[in-house]
Amino acid sequence: MKKSIFYILLLLLLALKSFAQPFPSTDEKFPFLCTFGKNSSPEWGDDDFNQTFFFVIPQTEKNPVYIRIFDADVGGKYDEVHERTFNTKTQYSVYGGKGAHSNPDAKKAHPVGNYKSGILLATKTVGQDTTYDNKWLTLGPFNPTEGELQPDFGGYVLKIVIDGLEGDDGNMYKMFLSSKSSDNKPIEGGNAFTYEYCLRIPDTKGSICHLYPFIAANVIAVQIHVFDFDDDGIIRIISVSKKGLGEKSSGNNVWIKNVQKTTKEELNTSYDIQFIKQNQTKDNNIVVYTTNQFDELMPFFAAPIGGVPKFKYKIGVKTGK
């Protein structure tokens, strides 16, 4: 049963032909990923000071690839300072080889066990550094075959683990899988996904951000976990059969869980989880992950599998004799 589900996912991935390789993506509309130093308070929006992301490279790709990070340092224009001066470092580590993605610890919501599974291919630790402030840091080159072959996901998978080291500041950054070391050039057929996000909410009142978990064929319930939304707005769920269901928002430094039962029409499509800002607050960061009825984490793809879900109106027609 699980194999058939994965093969359906693979066919959908191969059919995309889009270039879904930035984090956050254009469709998601979040300004930044964020990771805080390990001495930070969770009430600032990062529950465990770690993030893990995966990049998929098609088996047909023969040229080297690069992982590029925008504003990798902790200091300057975008980052969130505490105690007046920046004192934080962030470590970026790229893994490939056996277990990089397939190891169960690599797919958990928290950095426990062997979450740094696989073969370490590159690592870089950055503090406050004008070399990378408002500029791009490039890791690589990587041979596509250095990733872990995961046919169910459409190719070789590279993992990047981001750890907040000492300090109490928030690092705001973006990433891109590229075929060039000095430019963001997408790889045809490539993709990107994660099982948990820590994200910056836009400051603008009325802004709407999106996350797109994929609903596999065996999912009968989706559990949406949100941390530290600060009662900053509402959460809305849209799918092919849900027309903007409103859900409760999490408060400061607390988790909430919203449970959505799936319909037959939603299987093998994506949800659109929308975060609608209703206040004029600044510097709000949240953590989000989704699980199925077995408490297994569900992947968020940078671009929604099957496209952005649209509610399908059903018009009933009565017939008489």
Image (spheres, grey):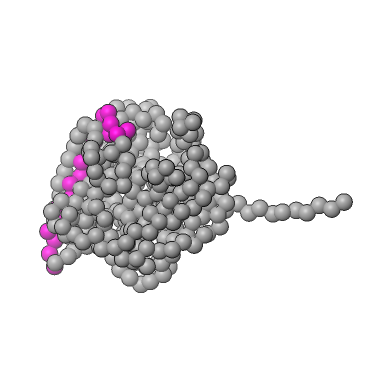
Q: Quick check: 61 above or below 94? A: above
- Give x and y (percent) for residue 304: 45, 46
Q: Residue at x 33, y 28 (%)?
A: 149
Q: Residue at x 51, y 55 (%)?
A: 238
Instruction: Point out the stretch of residues depicted in magenta.
Output: 84-103
- Give x and y (percent) for residue 284: 31, 64
Residue 147 horizontal side relative to residue 273, left or right: left
- Give x and y (percent) for residue 169: 18, 60
Q: Residue at x 32, y 55 (%)?
A: 287
Residue 44 horizontal side relative to residue 315, left or right: left
Q: Nearer the viewer, residue 238 or 219?
A: 219
Residue 102 lies within the magenta run: yes
Residue 171 lies within the magenta run: no
Residue 75 seen: no
Q: Quick check: 137 above or below 57? A: below
Q: Nearer the viewer, residue 27 or 287?
A: 287
In the orientation shown, which residue stands out farthest toward the bottom?
A: 280
- Give x and y (percent) for residue 43: 25, 63
Q: Quick check: 25 above or below 205? A: above
> Which picture quadrant has residue 77?
bottom left
Count of marks overlaid on the render: 0
Residue 242 horizontal side relative to residue 122, left or right: right
Residue 240 seen: yes
Q: Main secondary structure of the magenta part?
A: loop
In the orientation shown, which residue stands out farthest toward the front?
A: 294
